[in-house]
Image: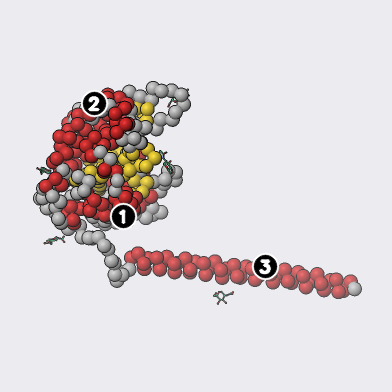
Amino acid sequence: MRCRLQNLFILLALLLILLIVTMFLTDGNDSNNLGIDTFRERELLQHITRDPKRKLKYNYPISNNYTLKKISIDVSKGMYSDTVELDRHMPVVTGFRQSEAYLGLGMVASVQSHMPLKRIIVYTMGVHPKIMKQMRSMCNVEVRNVDFNKYPRIVSKPESRAWRVYMLMEVLAEFGAFFYASPQVRFRAPVNLLLPYIKNHKGIIGKLTPNVTVVSSTHPETFRSLNVNLKTFEGKFPNAVAISEHVLVVMNNSQLYDTFWTPLRHCAEDWKCIAPKGSTPDWVDNGTTVEHTHHYDLSVVNILMYRHFGTEWTRDAGLAKMMDRVVDFAKSGGLHDYLWAHYCNPPKMEIDCTLDKSKC
Ligand SMILES: *[C@@H]1O[C@H](CO)[C@@H](O)[C@H](O)[C@H]1NC(C)=O
Ligand SMILES: *[C@@H]1O[C@H](CO)[C@@H](O)[C@H](O)[C@H]1NC(C)=O
Ligand SMILES: *[C@@H]1O[C@H](CO)[C@@H](O)[C@H](O)[C@H]1NC(C)=O
Ligand SMILES: *[C@@H]1O[C@H](CO)[C@@H](O)[C@H](O)[C@H]1NC(C)=O
Ligand SMILES: *[C@@H]1O[C@H](CO)[C@@H](O)[C@H](O)[C@H]1NC(C)=O
């Protein structure tokens, strides 16, 4: 009996040892296999992304060897028919401060991934020199330092948003078109999908924000400064929908100079018009009445649009759908998509952040 118990113990001990040895062996084999697998996977990935024999099919031109044709763009005189050339004449323009730089680089990355040739113009205000240097060597990115001496003093106060009006008008005069995108924008498709809508919309397209009204997002003082009676406006356009502050697509239209751009620029020279006292981008109603949600220059754009086009410009379901397809917004929190912004003002190079930390 005792002998049997002893045998049983020995047997158990042996089993235990066997189990440990097996586990050890399989483990070793497994981790080896794992190593091989990840290596293979990595190789496969390299094959997919780097295989020189891979046949790429872009539905977008990939040669950057072109010079802009000297064409005059004026929507009121008919639409220039070469859409590739028009697309080239429509840079993506943005502007950011240091606090928005990484958010903005995520926008840049989204342009690069969907529009490999799209020129991106970044106006900077107080961005750290290191980031400026990085941006200057990024693919198709042109960094412009705002020279405040050239403009009225209000432009040097970023909180007035007056800079945006001046920068956009500058780009419009230079290229004949622009796609303004705030740092929050993430492109999901090329902007040339919107070109067919531009003519019908007289050269100005915004992104409608169905649950935000013009009146709720505009300081009453701005209406007054533009000589627009608030009550009349509300009566004429009940629940007038506002456009997003983050997107504005424009193509040169000489018919809009007097009715649109000149009043917009005049307004941008005057605090009382573009950024009245008490304006705030995100007012929360807590009983105080001195503050009012305000979209600054885009509030002015809204009022001018309704004043000149009535409500007709807001009724284009096809355009709204296309706009949703092209433009998305960054969801806040833990954004790392700026890592995808890449460098290619020669040589073309993608940055591996695990190896090249200083560039990330
Ligand atoms: C290790 O794994 C390979 C492949 O799965 C298998 O052929 C081999 O027999 C394993 N070796 C051991 C010691 O388990
Ligand atoms: C760019 O294109 C022009 C004419 O199409 C050609 O002569 C020139 O060699 C090209 N340059 C490069 C760098 O490919
Ligand atoms: C804008 O339109 C005006 C009037 O037709 C024209 O003189 C000007 O050259 C156009 N601007 C651009 C950049 O095409
Ligand atoms: C508008 O509606 C959407 C979805 O219904 C919501 O996520 C968003 O916060 C709303 N925006 C405002 C300003 O109320
Ligand atoms: C309301 O919010 C503003 C800031 O938006 C703040 O300065 C003010 O103290 C708040 N008032 C109350 C009563 O909480």
Around disc 1, counting alpha carbons within 10 Å, would you say few (fewer than 14), some (14 to 19), or many (20 or more)? some
Residue tagged 1: 189
Classify the position of ligand 3 by quadrant: top left, top right, bottom left or bottom right: top left
Q: Indicate yes or no: mark 2 CB to ligand 3 under 8 Å.
A: no
Q: CA distance from mark 3 to mark 1?
A: 56 Å
Residue corresponding to mark 2: 227
Q: Position of residue 310 (x, y in %)?
A: 25, 38
Q: Determine whether label 1 and label 2 are within 8 Å by CB.
A: no
Looking at the image, residue 162 sits to the left or right of residue 38; the answer is: left
Q: Earlier in the sequence, mark 3 or mark 1?
A: 3
Q: Which mark is residue 95?
A: none
Label 3 sits on residue: 20
Residue type for callout 1: Ala
Helix or strand or loop: what does disc 3 sit on?
helix
Side of 39 where 343 appears, left or right: left
Q: Quadrant of the N terminus?
A: bottom right
What residue sits 31% from the left and 40% below the top?
243
Q: Secondary structure at mark 2?
A: loop
Give neighbour class at mark 3: few <14, some 14-19, many 20+ (Cα, 10 Å): few
Mark with earlier residue (3, 2): 3
Residue at (28% x, 40% y) in the render: 311
Camera-side residue of 76 and 114: 76
- Could you tell which of marks 1 and 2 lies nearer the N-terminus? 1
* 124 w.r.t. 24: above or below: above
Give the image location of residue 326, x and y in percent: 32, 52
